[in-house]
Image (spheres, coloured by chain):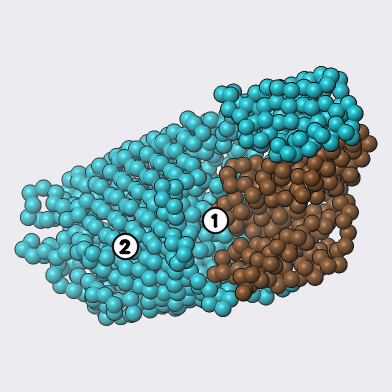
Amino acid sequence: MKYLITFLLLLSGVTVIAQSVISGQVTDKAGKPVKGASVSLDNTLDGTVTDTAGNFLFQTTESGPQTLVVTAIGYLDGGMPLTITGNQTNLRITIKAAPHSLDNVTVTAGAFEAGNDKGKTILSTLDIVTTAGANADVVQAIQTLPGTQKTGTESGLFVRGGDASEASVVVDGLTVQNAFFSSAPGVASRSRFMPWAFKGVSFSSGGYSARYGQALSSILELNTLDMPERTTITMGLNFAGIYASGQKLWKNSGGGITASYNNLSPFYKLANTNVDYYKVPQGGSASANYSWRPSKKGLLKTMLNGQYFQSGVRVPDPFHAGQTIDFGLKTTNFFGNVSYEENFGAKWQLFTAASYSYNHDDITWNGFAAPRKDQRAQARLEGKRYINSRLTLLLGGEWQHYTYQQSSDTGNRQFTEDNPALYAEASWSPTKRWAFRPGLRFDYSRLLNEGALFPRLNIAYRTGRFSQVGVATGLFYQTAEPMYLLYGYRPDMQLAVHYIANFQWITEERTLRVEGYYKDYQQLLREKGWTAYDANTYRTLYGNQVVDNSGYGYAGGAELFWRDKKMVKNLDYWVSYSYIDTRRLYQNFPQEATPSFIANHNLSLVGKYWINKLNTQINMTYSYASGRPYYNPNASDFLSERTPDYHNLAFTVNYLTSIKKWFTVVYAGVDNLTNHHNIFGYRYSADGTQRYAQRPALYRSFFIGANFSLTEFNRDEL
Amino acid sequence: MKNILLTAAILLSGFAATAQDYKTPLTATYLAFDTTMNEQPRLEAANKLKLIAKKFPDVWQANYYAAYAFTNLSYAEKDAAKRDAYLDEAQGYYEDMLAVLDNKENSETHVLAAMMANARMAVKPQQRYQKYGKIFDQHLDAAKADNPDNPRIYYLKGVTKYYTPKMFGGGADAAKPYFEKAETLFANEQTDDVDVIHWGKPQTAYFLGAIRKEEQ
């Protein structure tokens, strides 16, 4: 550099007359030199860049009044007027650091966003796939987030004191009636959703949008990919089955088909099961998807999915503790939806969607047929108006129509329900720091002949570059479960008022979230007329009981989420902790109590470590839950005794490689490594003298599998 | 060598300014930029290309080289925020260039757009490959449709293949045919006129050299 300047000075002296040297130093407000700053005379080619000491030196043939301009990344532009009459040396220029631009704040109270679209999300779909113990099931990965309960003997998502019926799963804006595989009593089943098909997952543990209703606790919103990411063929096999899928991407459209066959024999052969299968779960599914962009502003998406599964299991007789019963299940399920979205200019967006689902569970109890069937059709139409960059209005309506049928030795029962609803919601950010999302929803139940208005409000305030606080509240509701409607009961809607406050601090690499909530349950259902408490959730109401809305309850809690990708290179981990205090008087409870699906303390520790040299990722999940209440007929207080604590340590290893042109992932895992004998409750014999533990289908389990994918195989690029 | 070139560039540009001629300073500065890998002279040359673009806003090539230089600075930088800031700057010149061209893109502007998308992706590959990978492919396809003999298409494709992990279909073996194709096409590209975009020949030779060394 020194030579250069000397050389330059020498040369310039010789070749050009009337050259002036402009030199000096650029510093920031604290006096620290700014390196790499551009220094030039405005509208000339004369200029240079500061060195590491902030110094600059250049020559110019200009003379008279000029403007010296200084620009640098991360600083506001600076400079000074200059009158050039010969050399100008020892110039001192100070520039100010640019204030960090604040991103617009968005509401987060009660909401966990996971997706690939946005910059800062809490989980990506890849995170879901690689969570140990989650078995590539979206819901099981969500269960590592705060606000959820560990489950082992019941299917479903249990959120903040709510039972499984209080959480609703929504795909592309439409409710999924049977989000989980049908299963035998006492056996938990997985959700029907593999993460691959989704671009985003939004888990609300309360205070959700006015777009949705019919859920007292939670909405799990899944959004399918707009287009296949690329033309790919994927095949795989594991202990639970085989699958194949093809996705093709054309210019303005894309689509694909997927088929799978599952048979859990190898999986169950490897470990001792706590469940006695006389027919191991097996079946197949097929699906097709198609997306089309008719123009740059429109997008049509369709998805069809059909499944058939059967299983036979000897389960503890829910009516007679200590005895078993043969539970046979053949399930036929179909789900299809179509959605269309179009932007009209910069001001309007239209979204419309429709779905149909069908589920038939052909159930036999010790050979006696007890089939059940349900169908649902739903349509949604909404318009979004972008009034200006700070205010957006959403207006919409939906119609849900569903029917349930159930047959047994006592006859056939059925009901049909229609739920039309209208909603309006505004997203208003008067400044970059404030965001308000008020909403109002009107929902009508034809069966109950009842309509009501439900207000919602979510507010966020940005406290700093990375941090924000938020509050949310609203009135949430839910019609009685099918079990009551089938038997002719028509109680009013059940209600819950949510109050949520949160603090969130999020950077690219770290996330801290603290959230507290209180939920006030009102008008919960109560069954009156039982002579004794029956712990069986499959109890049958023969119409002898009185069902009314005199139940009530509350849930309050505090939750913590911490995720860190920075502390150790290639290590990504998160910690979720939830504390809950909840009691309720509902259904057949004789008195107010904490329900049997509640553990007061829940902890998840999820870690993922990538070993670059080995192309291998090691994932670990440790889950802990404190003991859950169970009903002991001999105890003096109702639901007063607790099971031992729950512990689970799960590991998976993924090895990435390529075989010929096939990108290959080989994975292996173990769930409940320590073989801890988790117990989810106890059931007692009729006389109360014997008790039987409710155990998960497996304590420790192993699996191994491989996934092969071939991408863009026909692309000729040369 | 590089210092002399740079000095020449700086001096020549001093003359050029008075002559109101963009071509001489642009040629010298572009050469100064493209023939060094040292940080400070590259920064200075990029800065000079920026001044040329500002001084001659109606010359699309002036904007082209400013965008080209800042995209290259982004690749060499380590700090993620700075890399994006360089690309923001490049994006500005790219848009000015399109405005000069009445938004009529050609094979070279598509290649530039593809390179900028690739540089964006390189800042945070895991988060960005889906979005920018697609943009990269689209621009290269368009560049190929406009002129299938543009060697820079295959050079860029080769570079991305080279840096893609083997298990995702990348690596030296996969990249080699692309560089070879680029090399063949570069042999037909004999110009040193700065108005005709012609960068990439020495870079291609560098990668082919590295690949051949790996093979031995």
Question: Closer to the camera, A176 or A575?
Answer: A575
Question: In the rendered image, is residue B22 in sight?
Answer: yes
Between residues A542 and A276, which one lies in front from this camera angle? A276
Spot occupied by residue A560 in the image (x, y as percentages of width and height): 35, 42
Residue A356's disc number: none
Q: What's under tag 1, amino acid-wise?
A: Gln
Chain A: colour as depicted? cyan
* Residue at mark 2: A650
Q: Chain of mark 1?
A: B
Tag 2 and tag 1 share a subunit: no
Q: Residues within 10 Å of mark 1 (few under 14, many from 20)?
A: few
Kind of residue sitting beneath label 2: Ala
The residue at 83%/29% (across/down) is A60
- Asked whether, in this view, residue A155 is left or right of residue A49, the answer is left
Residue A13 on image: x %, y %: 85, 31
Label 1 secondary element: helix
Q: Nearer the viewer, mark 2 or mark 1?
A: 1
Residue shown at 44% from the left, 62% from the top:
A611
Q: In the rendered view, does A340 fall on the left or right side of A637?
A: right
Q: Quadrant of residue A97?
A: top right
Q: Quadrant of the C terminus of chain B?
A: bottom right
| Residue B126 - label | 1
The residue shown at (57%, 52%) is B124
Task: Tell me the brown chain.
Answer: B
The image position of residue B147, as x and y in percent, is 83, 64
Q: From where the camera sits, is residue A445 visible?
A: no
How far is the residue under mark 2 from the one under mark 1?
Answer: 25 Å
Seen at 60% across and 64% down, the residue is B164
Residue B38 position, x and y percent, is: 68, 47
Q: Is residue A608 rendered to the left or right of residue A365?
A: right
Classify residue A294 as left or right of residue A662. right
In front here: B173 or A504? B173
